[in-house]
Amino acid sequence: MTEQNMVTLTIDDEKVTVPAGTSVMHAAEKVGIKVPRLCYHPRLSVEGACRVCIVELKGSRNFIASCATPVQEGMEVITTSPSIREARRDIVELILDNHPKECQTCERDGNCELQRLAYAMGVRERHFEGKRKNYDNDLSGAGVIRIPNKCVLCQRCVRVCEEVQGVTALSQTHRGFDTVVMPAFNLPFAESVCTYCGQCINVCPTAAFLEKDSTRALFKAISNPEMTVIAQFAPSVRAAVGEGFGLEPGISMEGQMVTALRKLGVDVVFDTQFSADLTIMEEAHEFIHRLTNGGVLPMITSCSAAWMKYIEQFHPSILANVSTCKSPMSMMSAVTKSFYAKKMNLDPDKIFNVAVMCCTAKKYEAARPELYGDNGKPYTDAVITTREFVWMVKAQGIDFINLKKSEPDSALGFSSGAGAIFGTTGGVMEAALRTAYEKITGESLAEINFNAVRGMKGIKEAEVNIGGNIVKVAVAHGLANAKTLMKQVEEGVSPYHFIEVMGCPGGCIGGGGQPYAGSNSIPLDTAILEKRAQALYNIDEKKVIRKSHENPEIQRLYKEFLGAPLSEVAHKYLHTHYKQHFPQGI
């Protein structure tokens, strides 16, 4: 970088040189000063709404918002002084005085950015009494609920929904004291275009957005002696759950998950990585069938519940491109209440299937009528997020960190390395290519790692030579990135044969139900997502079997129950169809 692109300024009497365009906030970090902030988020556009990050600029009559002010040559900035500290404290006090007084009963108690700010600013009492905002809670959503009285108007939710997810389900409406964040026309979530991805929960600094609680239903089922409670847990959960107990990101707690579920009172523990292998068997064969028989291409994956609601709403003209495969969660639940119930002589109506997922949208998926059984009841009875699981373990007094490791139950518990990488962006594509390549060519892959589809780039592309045919694939994570690829498909100019889409940044590892960021981390921090992804790649590397079609329990399931991929039985339990979907209020 040339000198012309650099700017030198003084911050708290210390000179610092930074690239032109750097914010004063980030320049301060270069000299070891972290300016307090609330509305700022590094992955989102700069709003400058909260004014918590104000600093003093020599020559300026007013304090400036350091997040929204670019550096200039010769600037002299003061980040802390009695007047600045008082002003920041006043700002935080005003926010608090319009905030509910229920910290001890709030889901974010102990992990709330507003709490941390109040402590840091020295707020020890509330000075202002008077009229407060008062809105009804929106509990209508199947996966995400809204608590508007806890909103601090930082607009992080609005920005992540528009800029990262491309959904724009939320906006800030009205003015002054009446300002509130809501869906269009103040519609309930259940009647809006919300995809239940939960990214608003991830970035919200308070508890204005939460997942819909399922812990009560699970505790009730566990306490019912007539019910057989069967749990499954997603690949990405094991890569992040330790963070909920204070561990560093990127530590797999797979064995402890199994033990903890049993200590909670679950009767049988299966692994969603098994049904990820099952999904690959069906999806890879579906892709092969389309590729070799003139089927609709590109084929688009269908594992992400938020993604499926998104495409039904915004791109219904290309639903024929979507794989008919259910997600691993829904496949596992269907097989549990059919094959496993018969094998163990269990009444399916007496089975309570619970899925521990990274994803709030899985709650919505479980409630979809297309995924109900012949008895008119859901295959998946409850979905709890990683966060809900962490709370349940703590509520039961289970010492999660020091638990002995144990293995999932047999029949539907063994998995390949391919099943593990499902939890990160590119993993579904990589797992499918491992199987599709060998099924098409009849040859063993010499190198089974497809590095081109790995990493946190928003859209990744690769070409794979399969038996002399060049197969072009693409991977997108985050719904805004998916939108770019879908426009190509709609316009008939897509160069790809196979497209993987995951609704959340980083894939499932960045799901809306994952642990909240700690006091020293940032929600959706790319470095944290990369560590979680690496935990799954490490599981894959250590597996003896790393291809879905080589999983012996998968082979046994086909022999004893399904027959063959894409069979009539497989279609009944493992496949579904999607249709154009307009929310009730639109």
Image (cartoon, rainbow, N blue to C red):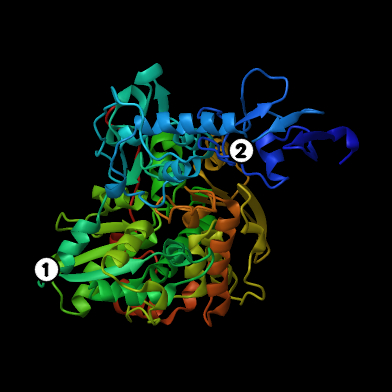
Q: Which quadrant of the view contains residue 26?
A: top right
Q: Is residue 4 left or right of residue 56?
A: right
Residue at 45 percent across and 59 percent down: it is 286
In primary-sequence order, the first of circles 2 and 1 is: 1
The residue indicated by pointer 2 is: 493
- Badge 1 element: loop
Give the structural element (helix, strand or loop) at label 2: loop
Above or below 230: residue 429: above
Q: Where is residue 224 in the image (x, y as percent from the top left)?
A: 11, 68
Depth check: 54 or 360 in front?
54
Q: Residue furthest left?
A: 226
How many numbered badges does the structure rendering display? 2
The quarter of the rendered structure image containing the N terminus is top right
Does the image show residue 373? no
Res 350 → quadrant: bottom left
Q: Return the residue nearer the eye: 245 or 529.
A: 245
Image disc number at residue 293: none
Q: Name the residue under label 1.
A: 224
Report x, y in % for residue 467.
65, 67
The amino acid beneath tag 1 is Asn
Give the residue at the far right of this rendering: 3
Which one is nearer the viewer's eye here, 4 or 476?
A: 4
Whole-percent x, y for residue 574 in the image = 33, 61
Q: Which amino acid does label 2 sit on?
A: Val
Q: Nearer the viewer, residue 500 or 295?
A: 500
